Image (spheres, grey):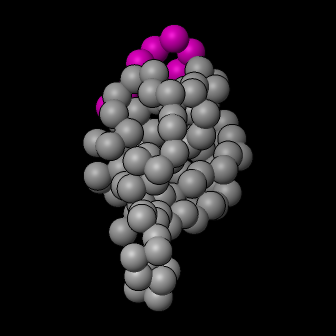
Amino acid sequence: MLQEYFGDKIEQSARTFGIAADIHKENATFRTDLLDVDPSFVEMFQFEVLAGSLEDTLANIANIALSEKTARRHFGHQDPIGKIFDYTRTSPKNGAGISRNGLLTGHR
């Protein structure tokens, strides 16, 4: 929308939408913040990727990139890539990447 209005004055844009969601794991529930972003978001900002691919994660709305802290909290030293996360307020997400900071999901 901004690119339509400002034309060639904007090189790139990305939409973001933050939501609070609950992760359900076994009999426990954990509150966390999610950031739904356009795929171009990872081209605009630098993230240290620890596992998986942020580009692949954001190419599919059913994927999620976990922060290192969240991955350790829920999986310890197990690999969360390919595991399904059950969230309140959003559809289940497939673990597809781990970044140093931030939980990212793709939207369209």
Q: Nearer the viewer, residue 82 or 14?
A: 14
Q: Residue 33: horizontal and vertical position, in percent? A: 66, 50
- Boundaries of the magenta span: 74-83
Task: Name above or below for residue 92 compared with residue 29.
Answer: below
Q: Residue furthest right?
A: 31
**Among the 4 quarters of the image, the one containing residue 27:** top right
Q: Residue furthest top?
A: 77
Q: Nearer the viewer, residue 48 or 6?
A: 6
Task: Name above or below for residue 10 compared with residue 103.
Answer: below
Q: Which residue is rendered at x = 63% and y = 61% of the image?
A: 19
Q: Residue furthest bottom?
A: 5
Q: Nearer the viewer, residue 44 or 97?
A: 44
Residue 77 among magenta residues: yes
Q: Main secondary structure of the magenta part?
A: loop
Q: Residue 67: horizontal and vertical position, in percent? A: 57, 33
Task: Say whether residue 86 is visible.
Answer: no
Residue 108 among magenta residues: no
Task: Name above or below for residue 85 compared with residue 19.
Answer: above
Q: Which residue is rendered at x = 64% and y = 26% of the image?
A: 69
Q: Quadrant of the N terminus?
A: bottom left
Task: Say whether residue 108 is visible.
Answer: yes
Give the side of residue 30 with respect to residue 59, left or right.
Answer: right
Give the side of residue 33 with respect to residue 52, left or right.
Answer: right
Q: Residue 88: horizontal and vertical position, in percent? A: 57, 57
Q: Quadrant of the C terminus?
A: bottom left
Q: Which residue is rendered at x = 59% and y = 40% of the image?
A: 102
Count of numbered tags: 0
Q: Residue 42: horizontal and vertical position, in percent? A: 43, 46
